[in-house]
Amino acid sequence: MATNTFDATVLKQVASEVRNIKAEYRGVVPEESIDEVAGESLERLANSRVPQFVPLFVGRFTRERLRELLRNQRQSKAS
């Protein structure tokens, strides 16, 4: 994870957002998978010029990716 790129405040906000996502997807997606997807989202934002928005975008990108993974999983089960 790109933890050394962001200050402690941003990382604290990201951690809070990840906790919220874990609560939303509890019992649907393993926490380890959420951590992995959130880490990938954070990496994508490593060179962000406006770090205040990083937690918001980590949340958005992580949720989008999780929805995509779940959609693909359902489609493969239906086939």
Image (cartoon, rainbow, N blue to C red):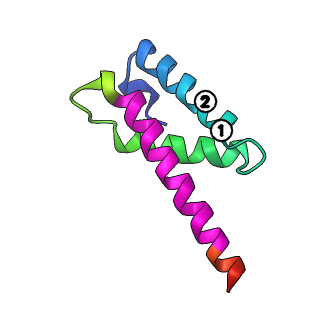
Which residue shows up at 57% across the image and 32% down it?
Answer: 18
Q: Secondary structure at mark 1?
A: helix
Amino acid bearing label 2: Asn
Task: Pick the residue in front: 14 or 3.
Answer: 14
Q: Secondary structure at mark 2?
A: helix
Label 1: few (<14), some or many (≥20) within 10 Å? few
Task: Pick the residue in front: 46 or 50.
Answer: 50
Query: Relative to 2, does residue 37 appear above or below in the rendering?
Result: below
Whether the residues at callouts 2 and 1 have beta carbons within 8 Å, the answer is yes
Mark carried by residue 73: none
In the rendering, at what x and y percent does residue 30 appear?
73, 48
Cα–Cα span, label 2 and label 1 = 6 Å
In the rendering, at what x and y percent does residue 61 appear?
43, 46
Query: Relative to 34, does residue 20 appear above or below in the rendering?
Result: above
Give the prevailing secondary structure in the magenta stretch: helix
Task: Pick the residue in front: 46 or 61.
Answer: 61
Query: Relative to 36, does residue 14 appear above or below in the rendering?
Result: above
In the rendering, at what x and y percent does residue 76 appear?
65, 79
Q: Tell me: 48 left or right of 76.
A: left
Based on the picture, tell me whether residue 1 belongs to the magenta stretch. Answer: no
Based on the picture, tell me whether residue 66 belongs to the magenta stretch. Answer: yes
- Residue 9 falls in which quadrant of the image? top left
Query: Relative to 42, does residue 5 appear above or below in the rendering?
Result: above
Label 2: few (<14), some or many (≥20) within 10 Å? few
- Give, as a single range, the part of the protein colored magenta: 54-74
The residue wearing badge 1 is 24
Which residue shows up at 48% across the image and 20% down it?
Answer: 13
In the rendering, at what x and y percent does residue 29 appear?
70, 50
Task: Pick the residue in front: 75 or 32.
Answer: 75
Amino acid bearing label 1: Glu
Mark carried by residue 20: 2
Extreme-top residue of the structure: 9
